[in-house]
Image (tube, helix red, strand yellow):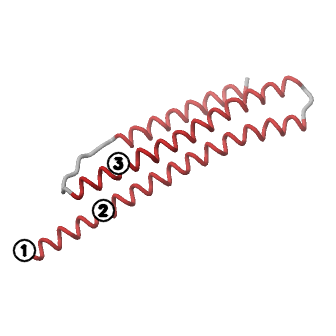
Amino acid sequence: MFLKDKINEYSRAQAHMANERTFLSWIRTSMAVMAFGFVVEKFGLFMLKFTELLSTIGEKREKVQVVEHYSSKTGLLLIIIGEVIALVSFIKYMNTTRQIKHEQYYHSVILDLLMTIAIVIIAVLFTVHLIESKV
């Protein structure tokens, strides 16, 4: 009986460590999405200022203002998506910790679904951004 308890305790510790690694992976992902959003937002501002310095043609300036407008909104949306991913990953981490403690586990796809939706939104926004910047 003593050996069975030790094995159960060891497997529970492994489950907790795996849960923590998964949580930290999601946190790294959310930080990367937020950092990417910051870069996208600042790149639009950089392009606007750079064009003001080098160009005196009104048409080019209008195109860059459109790009800057999309960059700001896209960057802000990426930062918000990163924050939501961090929050949902923490909730999932706590739920999984509670389930491990009670020796039950119920699979949840909410974080995976959220990340898939976020990637699709990002892809659509960048597609629109690229189409608008070439007009």
Say which label, 3 or 2, has the lower sequence index.
2
| Amino acid at circle 3 | Lys
The residue most toward the right is 56
112 or 95: nearer the viewer: 95
User: Which residue is located at x 17 percent, y 71 percent?
Assistant: 7
- As measured in the structure, the alpha-carbon distance from the residue carrying label 1 to the one carrying label 2 is 23 Å
Dot 1: few (<14), some (14–19), or many (≥20) neighbours within 10 Å? few
User: Which residue is located at x 46 percent, y 44 percent?
Assistant: 85
Label 3: state its secondary structure. helix
Q: Position of residue 115 (x, y in %)?
A: 44, 41
Say which label, 1 or 2, has the lower sequence index.
1
Q: Position of residue 112 (x, y in %)?
A: 39, 42
Residue placed under numbered mark 3 in the picture: 92
Residue placed under numbered mark 1 in the picture: 1
Among the 4 quarters of the image, the one containing residue 130: top right
Q: Position of residue 88 (x, y in %)?
A: 41, 44
| Amino acid at circle 2 | His
User: Which residue is located at x 69 percent, y 25 percent?
Assistant: 132
Label 1: state its secondary structure. loop
The residue most toward the bottom is 2
Dot 2: few (<14), some (14–19), or many (≥20) neighbours within 10 Å? some
Quadrant for the C terminus, please: top right
> Which numbered dot is residue 16?
2
Dot 3: few (<14), some (14–19), or many (≥20) neighbours within 10 Å? some
- As measured in the structure, the alpha-carbon distance from the residue carrying label 3 to the one carrying label 1 is 33 Å
Instruction: Please report contact status of discs 3 and 2: CB closer than 8 Å, yes or no.
Output: no
Say which label, 3 or 1, has the lower sequence index.
1
